[in-house]
Amino acid sequence: MAKSKKPPEMDGALIVDEDAEEGAAAKSGDDDVQEDGKAELAVEMVEEIVQRMGLDVRVEIREDADEVVLDLDGPDAGRAIGKKGQTLDALQFLINKIVNRFPEGRRHVLLDSGDYRERRDNGLASLARREAKRAVQQSRVITLEPMSPRDRRVVHLSLAKMPDVSTRSDGQGADRRVRIIPAGGRRRR
Amino acid sequence: MDQLSDLVSFIAKALVDDPDAVEVEAIEGDKTIILELTVGDGDLGKVIGKDGRTARAMRTLLSATCAKQSRRAVLEILE
């Protein structure tokens, strides 16, 4: 994935996060079920890996469209998620590497467990709104902790309609963070 | 092959072009197990990944696997 370098200007654009926008693009489009066997391969690989991790987890296909969504369930689902979803994210990262080893027909695989992602997204969105209020009240830029492209996208979207703040991402790779910038009276960086 | 070596070996073989060249050697210490991963020429990048993300993801899974055991696993990727 090539990352173009943008000048570090604060132009007030609502969403300045290429990685996160890619995630957005992957979400739209038709919902036809694909027949490339990627969903089945992903299920098999997750099963093989969690079994070797000693986890009692069942894996099912929830969606097999533009994006493959797998659902992990069972007694060890919580351990498969891990602290702040770290284990689930690591597993998801590796599964995507494995399933999309060849460039043609890439499809993103999302791992979920019950309503875990939804609950976490809601939690992130409310944290974002809370921090946005604080940014406005204190009229200063608030920088959040480093997040994955997906989490940053959730933050950007949750604040996109708030008139008195804008958001952008700064930093490289695993250290990329969202900055919440109050409209007007911005401080210099 | 112990569980941790098997985990690393399985993931590495799924990532590389030359699965036959994947080797994992486990060096067992008191509380630490060191896993030395060797891959074929040209496959090093596949198991390390951009900014070491693939290696980091494997380490995260190893830690999760060790969580219930009283030992720690260290993944070393040999060049």
Image (cartoon, coloured by chain):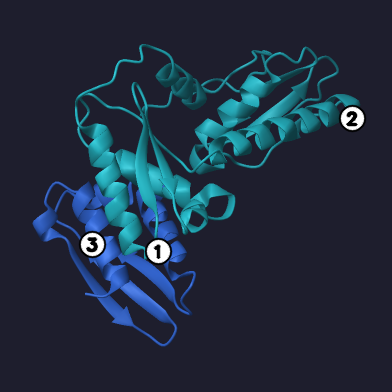
Chain colours: A cyan, B blue
Callout 2 amino acid: Gln
Image coords of residue A188 (percent x, y): 78, 25
Can you give x and y, in whole percent of width and height, for residue B78 in the image? Answer: 26, 64
- Residue drawn at 60 percent across, 41 percent down: A146
Q: CA distance from mark 1 to mark 2?
A: 43 Å
Displayed quadrant of residue A183: top right
The quadrant where residue A57 appears:
bottom left
Give the quarter of the figure containing the N terminus of chain B: bottom left
Circle on res. A68:
none
Q: Nearer the viewer, mark 3 or mark 2?
A: 3
Residue A189 visible in image: yes
Q: What residue is pinned by disc 1?
A: B62
Q: Residue furthest right?
A: A137
Q: Which residue is mark 3?
A: B9
> In what element is the residue under mark 2?
loop
Task: Kindly identify the residue that appears in the image at 35 percent across and 41 percent down.
Answer: A60
Using the image as rendered, state which of residue A109 and residue B34 is in the foreground: A109
Residue B50 in sight here: no
Cα distance in 3D space between marks 3 and 2: 52 Å
Crowd band around label 2 with a 10 angstrom C-alpha radius: few (<14), some (14–19), many (20+): few
> Where's the C terminus of chain B, which quadrant?
bottom left
Is A148 above or below relative to A30? below
Residue at the spot 55% in from the left edge and 37% down from the top edge? A117
Q: Is residue B35 left or right of residue A184?
A: left
Q: Position of residue A42 (x, y in %)?
A: 28, 40
- CA gap between label 3 and label 1 equals 12 Å
